[in-house]
Every structure is written in C-alpha cells, then in structure tokens.
Amino acid sequence: MAAATPAIRSPTASPRDWLVPLVLFALLAAVPLLAKLGPEGFILSLMTRVVVVALAAMSLDLLIGYGGLVSFGHAAFLGIGAYAVGILSSHGIEEAGPQLAAAIGGSVLFALASGVIALRTQGVYFIMITLAFGQMLFFLATALSGYGGDDGMTLPGRSLLFDRPWLKGDAALYWVSLAVLGAAYLGLRRVTASRFGRVLRGLKENEIRMEAVGFEAFRYRLVAYALAGAVAGVAGFLLANLSGFVSPAVMSWQRSGDLIFVVVLGGLGSLHGAILGAAAFLLAEEVLSHYLEHWRLVFGPLLVLAVLFARGGLVGIGRGRGA
Amino acid sequence: MTWTLFALQALNGVQFGLILFLIAAGLTLVFGVMDFINLAHGVQYMVGAYLTAAFAAWTGSFGTALLLALPSALAFGLLLEALVFRHLYDRDHLDQVLATFGIIIFLNEAVRVVWGAAPLGVPVPDILSGSIPIGGLNYPVYRLAIIAAGLGVAGLLYGIVGHTRIGMLVRAGATNAPMVSALGVNIRLLFTVVFGFGAMLAGFAGAMVAPILSVEPGMGDNVLILAFVVIVIGGIGSVRGAFLGAILVGLVDTLGRFFAPTLLRFVLDPSAASQTGRAIAPMLIYILMAATLFVKPSGLFPAKR
C-alpha cells in the first residue's frame, strides 16, 4: 500500500507548506477579475465547478489520504446535498439555511448508517460496500418519480439567502463557493493536524498497533466518514445551485470514480492537492472536448499514464521524489 | 398460473445469474490470484458482444461468429494484459481501480468510434430461435441454451479448478501467491493464463447475450458492478462462491423486479405499489450484499486465510 501514497508531512512544518495553498487560493481569487477578459459567464461557471469538485474531493482526501479508507461511493453525498436543494425547493422552501441543514443532516445520517456497516469490512470489501451504498441511493433517486425520477428536475432558481436572491449572479455564487472551499480547507487542515487526525493517520499506518495502544479504530473512522460526508453534502448543495438541475446522474458510480481520480491526480494526503486535481481534471476535460469529438479516446489513456508515471500526484511534482 | 409465471421468472433469474457467473468467475480468479482489481473486466464482456456482432454480420452465422469471437476476445485480453495490467500488479488497489477506470473510458469511446453509438442487433441463430411451452406459457429456446451453456462452463470450471494441476496452482495462488512462487512456479505465467482465460469467459458471456440484449457502448459498466457484487457476496477468489453468489443475485434481482410491485399491492394502493416496487427492486441486491457483509465481512466462501 505504501508505494503510491506519499509520505504525509508532519503538521508542524515549514512555511513552504503554506506557500502552494496560498498561491492556489490567490489564483482562484483572481479568477473573477480575469474572467472579465473572456467569456465571463462560461469561465465563472467552469471555475465554480472546479471549486465545487475540489471541495468534494478534499473531503474524500480526508478519507483516502489520511484515513486509508478508499470510498467508492462518495458521489452519494453530492447527490444528497443536491437533492436536499431540489426536494425542498420543489416544496417552496428556497431558503439556503434549511436546505444546507437538510444537506448536512442527510449526509451525516447516511454516513453514520452506512458507515456502521461499511467500516466492519476492510480493503477491497470496503471499496465495494461503499459502492453498494452509493448504488442504493442512486436507484432510490431514479425511483423518486415525484422528483423527476430518472430524468431529474430543473430547479426554480438558485437558493435564497435571507429571502434575497444573493446567489443569483455567477460571480456571487463563485465567491460563496470559494469562501466555503477556503473555510473547508482551513477546517480540515486543523482537523488533520489535531490529535484526531493523528489517530486517523496512525490507524492507516498500523491498525493493530493503534488498537493495542488503546484507540478504537471504528469510532475514529466513523467520525471521519461522517465529517467527509457532511463536507461533500455542502458541495452537493453548491453543485445543484450551479447547474440549476438535479438528477440521479450526480451520484452515479462513475462520478465517484471521477472523485477518486481527482484526489489521486492532485496528490493524496495534502488537502490542497484536491484543488490541483479538480482544476487539472475539469480543465483537461473542457479543453479536450472542445477540440476533439472523441476526446475520451485521449482522456482514458491520459488517466492510465497518470497512474503509471505521475506517482504522488501533482502536489508531488513541485516537492520532488521522496521529499 | 402464478406458479408457472414464478417458474419462468425463476428460469430468467437463473439465466441472468449464469451470465453473471461467466463474468464473475474470471473477475474473482484474477482478483483472488493476482490481488488485482480489474474494473475493465466489464468492457471485455462488451468487446465480446461487439466482436460477435461484427463477425455475425460478416459471416452471417452466429455459430461461426462465436467460434471467431472467443479466440479474438482471448487475444484482446492478453494484449491488454501485456500493455497495461502487467505494470499494475505491484501497485495498490487504488492505482489499479484508476488505471482500469481509464481503460473503460477509452474502450467505451473506441467502440463508439468503430461501430457507432446506436445499439447493434444480432439475430438469434435459427436452430435456437423457437420457443417451447412450459406450463401453458412459451419460453424461448435460446434462453434455455444460455442456461445450458452457462451450466456447461460452470461444470468445466469445476473440473479444471478442482481436479487438474493448473487448477491446483490457481487455488494455491488464490490462497497464498508468494508461497506458490517460492515453490518454483512461474507465477507471472500463471497470472497471464488466468487473465486470458477470465477475459475469454467474459467475452463468451458477451457473445451469448448479444442476440437477446442490445449491443451498445457502456453495456459492460452495469454488469461489471453486478459482477463485483457477486464476487464480494461469494467471497473473493472462490469460484464456488462466485457461482452461488451469481445465482443468488440473478434470482433476487429478476424475481424482485417482477414480484416487488405485486407483493407491495397488499399494503399499498396499486399505483403507489408499482412505483415503490420499481424503486425497491434494483436496490435489493445491494441490500443483499450489505447484509451478507454485515454477517460475514469477507463474503460467504473467502479463499484467503
């Protein structure tokens, strides 16, 4: 297992650890200004997607990169967040507060319920059981014929903040998403540097030893699973607002695969790697699909090559091997 | 009448289960012996179906197409193994999932480029085209032929894995590959043989369903997930587990889709019952899997000790 996962650096590290994330966030903050130079609406919506996917991938990094828990059903939480927006607004509740509460509450509940069963298993079985839970939710959504069923449903509009359409503008939604990503980054950085985070990493390295020292693996992992689910639920809330549309496709297993790829491409166990990964993934997809009709013919092999040769992810490139 | 209907649905379930078994058998062996997660196993099923469709259109005979498709599927599997998979055996599961995910993306698009996005049809071979009456209802002969072929392959596999030298090595490899290697067996060669064989079985499954399902890009994706459900329920590395798991999943899925709406009518009004029934039915196998893992976290017949 150790081969492809980069050594996690200690939380009390040099200022260099802040440099890359700071540059990344500064670049993201400059996007609304730069967007004015080109097709503004298009650039903003693409970059909002980058930010939202980065948020979901960052929460998955907590599970895979720090906890060693390869969840293949993380898109389910995106779906819960998105459907919280869709279902509530179809009943006339368009206020962001209750929608967010439902997104987070639903995600945590689902994470706890499925985590209790999934965390009994290990390794490949964990990958597969998280996939199974994701599929259950996917089929549940396709069966919600009152809420669009297979086809999904179009939202009446973006969520309201304090009864006002503050999220209506593309730039506004971008700033809100970026603020959420920043908050999540700082929050998750604190969490991973805390005692809880160290226990989680310890369990990844050697579960038996950690149990012998007296930590109960199950509890720590369940909390991490619920926390990651909650963050991804918020990402789902933002995603629904961005696309103005909610459908079961949000939580198909291919989307979960995409999220894993984004995290691994960016670099496991770094948090800000998720931002790099999301940007690289979505921009590559956008550029390739713009120039080539059959862009997947290039994209698939790129994925294979990335796995074979870019060990440690994009984050690892600046750092150098074995740093 | 209801019992006949039940019997026919059960036959459909067994037939679906046997197709799943053909795919799952290769998957579980590759997984068990090499500890390699091959998400691209589903596209090998798709490639088998496409090859059969192409050869059937070319030669005009399903039998000839099948005979040509099997070695082609084998060759294709070996080619993929040599090009990509060989470099992934030493990697962790995460890398394997990702790289084979990339291959799925590529091949789904590749068949779309070569054969178009529209589904292809393959005519049912003439000898097997009729239907025979079972309890007052007609059942297509071709589906019975699938059942027969599936059972035949299962028997063959049982013989090979259980009673030959290579089967012994495969079982030993599933239990402890490094030890088998230490005893002087060329484990890489064994890997390649198992891999090619698994690819051919998946291709065979694709060929068999080509006349009754539409052959289209992405047809392997959902089957792949079901095959994983099967081997996780059965226990990774166990062919016997894959067989039981496949039949179980086939029956639960088919009977669930058919009877869930009917059964729910006892507690709900008809329209709500059919709606909820259709909602619950696809979830049943995942519930079955979660329940199995809850009781036995490594499946019914785990091969590894």
Image (cartoon, rainbow, N blue to C red):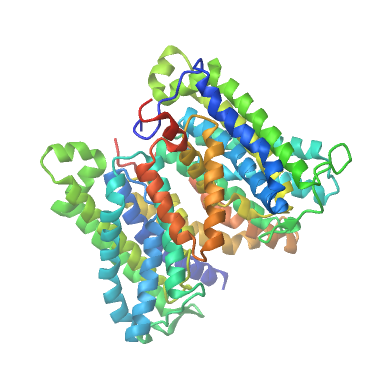
Name the residue located 73 percent from the left edge and 57 percent from the top edge: A153
Q: Quadrant of the C terminus of chain B?
A: top left
Q: Quadrant of residue A105?
A: top right
Residue A68 vs A77, above or below: the answer is above
Name the residue located 49 percent from the left edge and 71 percent from the top edge: B8
Residue B205 vs A120, above or below: the answer is below
The mark total stands at: 0
Q: Could you say where residue A10 lies in the image, as x and y percent from the top left?
A: 47, 18
Q: Is residue B275 visible?
A: yes
Q: Is residue B255 visible?
A: no
User: In the image, B157: left or right of A52?
Assistant: left
Name the residue located 45 percent from the left edge and 31 percent from the top edge: A68
Farthest residue to the right: give it. Answer: A163
User: In the image, B116: left or right of B62?
Assistant: right
Q: Quadrant of the N terminus of chain B?
A: bottom right
Name the residue located 70 percent from the left edge and 55 percent from the top edge: A144
Residues B243 and A46: in front is: A46
Residue B38 vs A211, above or below: the answer is below
Farthest residue to the top: give it. Answer: A213
Q: Could you say where residue A297 lies in the image, as x and y percent from the top left?
A: 44, 61
Farthest residue to the left: give it. Answer: B184
Residues A25 and B16: in front is: A25
Farthest residue to the front: give it. Answer: A37
User: In the image, B49: left or right of A177?
Assistant: left
Q: Quadrant of residue B128?
A: bottom left
Residues B11 and B156: in front is: B156
Q: Could you say where residue A176 lies in the image, as x and y percent from the top left?
A: 74, 37
Q: Could you say where residue B9 lies in the image, as x and y percent from the top left?
A: 51, 67
